[in-house]
Image (spheres, rainbow, N blue to C red):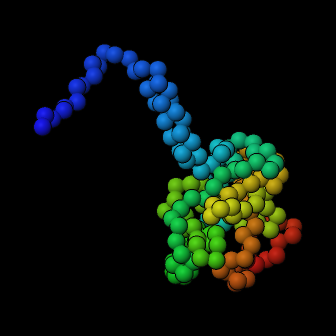
Amino acid sequence: MPRLSPIPAPTSLAPQPDEAAQSASTQSQSKKRELQPAERFALRVGASTIDGLGVFAEEAIPVRRKIGELRGESISVREARRRAKGRARIHIVEVSETRAVDATDSVTALRNINHCCAPNAVLRISQGRVEFYALRDIEPGEELTCHYGESHHEGRLSCRCGAANCSGKL
C-alpha cells in the first residue's frame, strides 16, 4: 500500500483567515491563563521599625483595593507546623484545615508584611490564596501591616507595633 507523506507548505504564504483567527484565539486563551503579578502596586522591602524587614508602598494604594498575594509552596498543615518549629522567622499561612502556603523561599515582597494591632491592610484567604487588601488609603512610603490573628506564637511573643491599641502580645 502506498504511503502518503505530508507536503510541506511554502513558508512564504501568509496564514489563511481561519488559521489566523485560531491563532489569535489560542493567544487570547494563553493570556487568560497567565499568572497575575503577585503585587498589584509598587512595593519595596526595607528595614522596619516594627520588626526586621517590612514591606512599604512605593505608590498610593486606595482603600479596598487588592494589594497582592502571598505566594509560595503549597504544603500540608502538618508539614507547615513541623517547618515552623525550627525557624526564627516564619512565612507560613494556613489556608484551610489541611493546606498551608510556605512563602519562605518566595520572592514576593508581601512575605515581609509585619503584624500591627492597628493595621492598614487585611489578609483574606480565598480559594486557597492568601490575599491582602487595603483597609484605608495607604500613602507612598508607608509600611504595610496586617493583624496576624491566631498564630503559632499563642501570646508568647511581644508585639512591637506601637499602636495606641496594641495588645502587647502575638
Count of marks placed on residues: 0
Where residue 88 sits, quadrant-wise, is: bottom right
Report the side of 61 relative to 82 (left or right). Answer: right
| Rendered view: 118 above or below 78 | above
- Report the front residue among 100 and 59: 100
Screen quadrant of the C terminus: bottom right
- Report the front residue among 166 and 151: 151
Q: Residue at x 53, y 39 (%)?
A: 29
Q: Residue at x 59, y 46 (%)?
A: 36
| Rendered view: 59 above or below 131 | above
Residue 49 on image: x %, y %: 70, 61
Q: Residue at x 70, y 83 (%)?
A: 154
Where residue 70 sits, quadrant-wise, is: bottom right
Residue 100 on image: x %, y %: 58, 71
Instruction: Please identify the residue farthest to the left as the structure is shown.
Output: 1
Screen quadrant of the N terminus: top left
Q: Residue at x 64, y 72 (%)?
A: 96
Instruction: Please identify the residue farthest to the right as the structure is shown.
Output: 164
